[in-house]
Image (tube, helix red, strand yellow):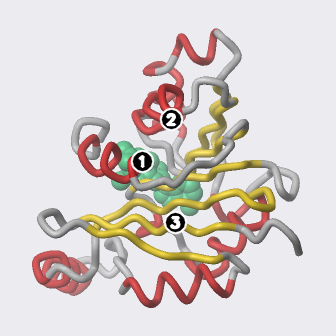
């Protein structure tokens, strides 16, 4: 998983505008590669990774043992549906190649928006629905496996982010099928 997503992760993290990220959450952290990159990009930040799968939690912990030992990283099993953090906890929340699996996308985005600090960012990095290849593949997979990953159209994602009270825009590449949604929580309610 880490190797498979390294390109999209490096590209996506580069799209993030300047943010004073002292506290960072990575949702659906998988093998923990994004957290490793975040630790390098934001050397003063305290990091938290969550994942539904205990196997992923173990992999993230193992692959980032130095960060855990240094007290910079906490990894917990947790469902995006039940985020167990106080409101406004994180300056930056990332979610790489994971929203496809969230059971109630609109509500789950609201769950994440709740824990983003005012002025902070929620960044979703994923496959871009607008490439013909992704669209065709997705429709075929859904036909064969109704539980398969669901890629939403970019305007649908923008709608969900706005409905969650965030101010989003997105970046795409011309050559690769990737998209990064950058959504800021307004600094004042
Ligand atoms: C395709 S992997 C991506 C992992 C990692 N972000 C990466 O880019 O390598 C999707 C991850 O999302 C996690 N996930 C799926 N549904 C989730 C949920 N409801 N809450 C939290 N994590 C979830 C999975 O367990 C899996 O580790």
Whether residue 103 is situated above or below residue 21 in the rendered picture: below
Q: Quadrant of residue 15?
A: bottom left
Q: Residue 69, image x and y in percent?
A: 63, 10
**Among numbered discs 2 and 1, the one appearing first in the sequence:** 1
Q: Is residue 14 left or right of residue 117?
A: left
Describe the element under mark 2 as helix, strand or loop. Answer: helix
> Residue 182 has which mark?
3
Tell me, yes or no, whether the two marked residues, 2 and 1, touch with CB atoms within 8 Å. Answer: yes
Q: Residue farthest to the front?
A: 18
In the image, 142 versus 177, the foreground residue is 177
Can you tell me whether the CB of the residue at mark 3 lies under 8 Å from the nearest atom of ligand 1?
no
Identify the residue at image location x=46%, y=69%.
181
In the image, 64 versus 11, the foreground residue is 11
Residue bearing the label numbered 2: 38
Residue bearing the label numbered 1: 13
Q: Residue 110, image x and y in percent?
A: 70, 74
């Amino acid at each position: 998983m880490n190797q498979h997503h390294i390109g999209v992760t490096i590209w996506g993290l580069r799209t993030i505008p300047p943010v004073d990220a002292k506290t960072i959450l990575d949702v659906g952290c998988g093998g923990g590669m994004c957290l490793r990159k975040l630790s390098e990009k934001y050397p003063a930040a305290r990091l938290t990774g969550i994942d539904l799968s205990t196997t992923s939690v173990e992999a993230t912990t193992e692959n980032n043992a130095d960060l855990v030992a240094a007290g910079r990283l906490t990894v917990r099993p947790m469902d995006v549906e039940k985020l167990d953090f106080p409101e406004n906890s994180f300056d930056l929340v990332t979610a790489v190649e994971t929203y496809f699996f969230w059971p109630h996308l609109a509500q789950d985005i609201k769950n994440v928006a709740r824990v983003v600090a005012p002025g902070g960012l929620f960044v979703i990095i994923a496959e871009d629905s607008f490439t013909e290849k992704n669209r065709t593949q997705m429709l075929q997979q859904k036909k064969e496996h109704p539980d398969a990953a669901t890629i939403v159209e970019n305007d649908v994602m923008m709608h969900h982010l706005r409905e969650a009270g965030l101010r989003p825009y997105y970046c795409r590449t011309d050559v690769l099928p990737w998209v990064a949604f950058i959504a800021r929580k307004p600094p004042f309610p």
